[in-house]
Image (cartoon, coloured by chain):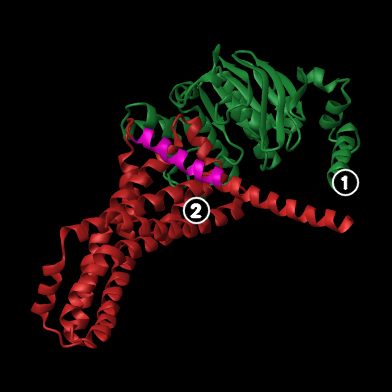
């Protein structure tokens, strides 16, 4: 469904992605793990064409999206839904207008019909009677649910999740995990999530890919990842402060202060 | 030898910093122009976000009317006072109305309106778009297959372009009447003579050159406000910087372009 080939991207002098290769099958749930600053967010923004790569290819359903202009990219984007880390709801619009935003732009539905659809989608994420509230009146967990409702409103084939559980308490985080699993079962979507929350990764992933220093270190099922031989992956999943990642980081800091 | 080497080091450092500034400046100008052309292309492609455009027109125009009217009225009034003081010295008091009218329509109407709207609406654009950028709302628009330049920038550019001339007409009128009020009530001028002197020497050219300026200023305010907001980086601090930057830059550009427009137009 999605194939990423030799993806490279740098910002000013900082090479964030240094040749990422990753293939995501149709219907699969792929979770990309990695530390802060490893380039996870940059990667996911390339998949939906918000960022353009320096070099490399990204195929979505067989089509190379790195070669498309804005217009064509927009029609590809309709295949996607994305949940942002802090939900990124439009704060000038009410909840139902947020959920129905895509419908308003891309279908000829009346406001009444859009409202009805929005109510349906909100029910799917477990929210009732919030249509007329403003995003700022909702709690963080509820905002994420509204964000998810907005992401599924256009019935996408692919769902992207940017740190879906970050900033939530454990109970709310697990509810979001359940919703992500539920979305796959109900909507039959391919999903890509990026996270550093291993509990969430094990729970929602078919396969896990670890991104480190702009490259994919290892891809495997949650079981394979748990039994990894790779010392970097092992340090990350065990959440230890001691290991090769820390050593790398210290070396880097030394070099920087030497300059 | 060593001292000389150090001195050379400072010079190259200085040149490097200077070079960086110039490069950044050029890059920024390029990005502003690019944003303008992207907006221009999107502006002519359906769908048209009419509701957004009207909302921005209200924001730029209607909501700025009170402050624009007050400013223009008092400017007209003080112009009458000052001109009277000067013209009295060679018995030309009857021409106060002419000076007020020409100053307002050609110069002060558009410039003052521009500066006020830059402070009020331009800064609001930078703050709003900047907040949308740092909270990923702009990215969210992309994911909903809606181009943010078309959805956010184009309506604001149109609003600036259309509303500034409208507000300038208002400020011209109240400025002239402010001058009239002071002349008649305080300076004992004759109302009929004042108004005749105003209309006799005022040409269409004066008015429409002022309105043309206003349209350019409106475009500058919206473009800079949108640019600063759209490319905001660095959280809340970045939004603050973008907001301040938009007011400073668009105010300067208004005054600079004012000179060149005047020089070209007459």
Chain B as rendered: colour? red
Q: CA distance from mark 2 to mark 1?
A: 39 Å
| x and y percentages locating residue B55 in the rendered image | 33, 49
Q: Nearer the viewer, mark 2 or mark 1?
A: 1
Along the line of sight, which residue is nearer the eye, B245 or B94? B94
A73 above or below B139? Answer: above
Q: Is residue B129 magenta?
A: no
Along the line of sight, which residue is nearer the eye, B230 or A93? B230
Residue depicted at x 57% and y 38%: A144
Kindly indicate the quadrant of the structure image that contains residue B167. Answer: bottom left
Report the quarter where the C terminus of chain B lies.
bottom left
Residue depicted at x 22% and y 77%: B179
Q: Which residue is mark 1?
A: A258
Provide the residue span drawn in magenta: B26-43
Q: Secondary structure at mark 1?
A: helix
Q: Is residue B36 magenta?
A: yes
Q: Is residue A200 visible?
A: yes
Residue depicted at x 38% and y 41%: B154
Q: Mark 1 belongs to which subunit?
A: A
User: Chief secondary structure of the magenta span?
Assistant: helix
Kindly indicate the quadrant of the structure image that contains residue A168. Answer: top right
Q: Secondary structure at mark 2?
A: helix
Q: Which residue is mark 2?
A: B127
Along the line of sight, which residue is nearer the eye, A167 or A75? A75
| x and y percentages locating residue B250 in the rendered image | 44, 56
Chain A as rendered: colour? green
Name, please, the residue furthest toward the top: A62
Name, please, the residue furthest toward the front: B1
């Amino acid at each position: 469904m999605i194939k990423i080939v030799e993806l490279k991207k740098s910002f000013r002098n900082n090479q964030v992605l240094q040749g990422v290769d990753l293939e995501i099958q149709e219907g699969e749930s792929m979770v990309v793990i990695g530390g802060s600053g490893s380039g996870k967010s940059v990667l996911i923004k390339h998949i939906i064409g918000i960022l353009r790569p320096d070099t490399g290819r990204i195929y979505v359903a067989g089509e190379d999206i790195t070669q498309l202009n804005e217009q064509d990219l927009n029609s590809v984007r309709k295949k996607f839904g994305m949940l942002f880390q802090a939900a990124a709801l439009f704060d000038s619009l009410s909840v139902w207008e947020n959920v129905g935003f895509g419908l308003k732009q891309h279908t000829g539905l009346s406001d009444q019909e859009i409202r009805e659809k929005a109510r349906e989608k909100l029910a799917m994420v477990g929210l009732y009677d919030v249509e007329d509230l403003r995003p700022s009146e909702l709690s963080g967990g509820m905002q994420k649910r509204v964000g998810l409702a907005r992401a599924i409103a256009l019935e996408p084939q692919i769902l992207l999740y940017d740190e879906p559980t970050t900033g939530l308490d454990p109970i709310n985080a697990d509810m979001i995990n359940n919703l992500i699993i539920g979305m796959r079962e109900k909507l039959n979507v391919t999903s890509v999530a990026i996270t550093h929350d291993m509990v969430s990764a094990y729970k929602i992933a078919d396969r896990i890919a670890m991104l480190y220093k702009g490259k994919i270190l290892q891809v495997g099922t949650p079981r394979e990842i748990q039994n990894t031989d790779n010392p970097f992956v092992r340090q990350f999943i065990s959440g230890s402060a001691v290991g090769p990642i820390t050593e790398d980081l210290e070396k880097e800091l030394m070099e920087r202060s030497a300059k | 030898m060593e001292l000389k080497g150090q001195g050379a080091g400072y010079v190259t450092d200085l040149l490097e910093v200077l070079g960086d500034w110039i490069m950044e400046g050029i890059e920024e100008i390029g990005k502003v122009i690019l944003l303008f052309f992207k907006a221009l292309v999107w502006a002519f492609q359906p769908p048209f976000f009419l509701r957004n455009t009207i909302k921005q027109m209200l924001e730029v125009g209607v909501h700025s009317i009170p402050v624009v009217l007050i400013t223009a009225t008092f400017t007209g009034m003080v112009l009458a006072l000052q001109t009277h003081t000067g013209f009295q010295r060679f018995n030309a008091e009857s021409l106060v109305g002419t000076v007020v009218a020409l100053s307002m329509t050609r110069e002060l109407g558009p410039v003052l309106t521009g500066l006020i709207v830059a402070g009020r609406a331009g800064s609001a654009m930078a703050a709003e778009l900047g907040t949308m950028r740092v909270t990923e709302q702009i990215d969210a628009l992309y994911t909903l297959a809606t181009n943010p330049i078309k959805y956010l920038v184009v309506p604001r550019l149109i609003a600036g372009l259309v509303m500034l001339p409208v507000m300038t007409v208002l400020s011209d009128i109240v400025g002239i009447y402010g001058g009239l009020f002071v002349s008649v009530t305080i300076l004992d001028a004759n109302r009929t003579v004042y108004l005749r002197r105003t209309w006799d020497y005022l040409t269409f050219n004066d008015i429409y050159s002022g309105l043309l300026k206003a349209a350019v200023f409106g475009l500058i305010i919206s473009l800079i406000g949108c640019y600063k907001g759209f490319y905001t980086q660095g959280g809340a601090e970045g939004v603050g910087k973008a907001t301040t930057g938009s007011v400073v830059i668009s105010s300067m550009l208004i005054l600079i372009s004012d000179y060149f427009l005047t020089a070209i137009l007459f």
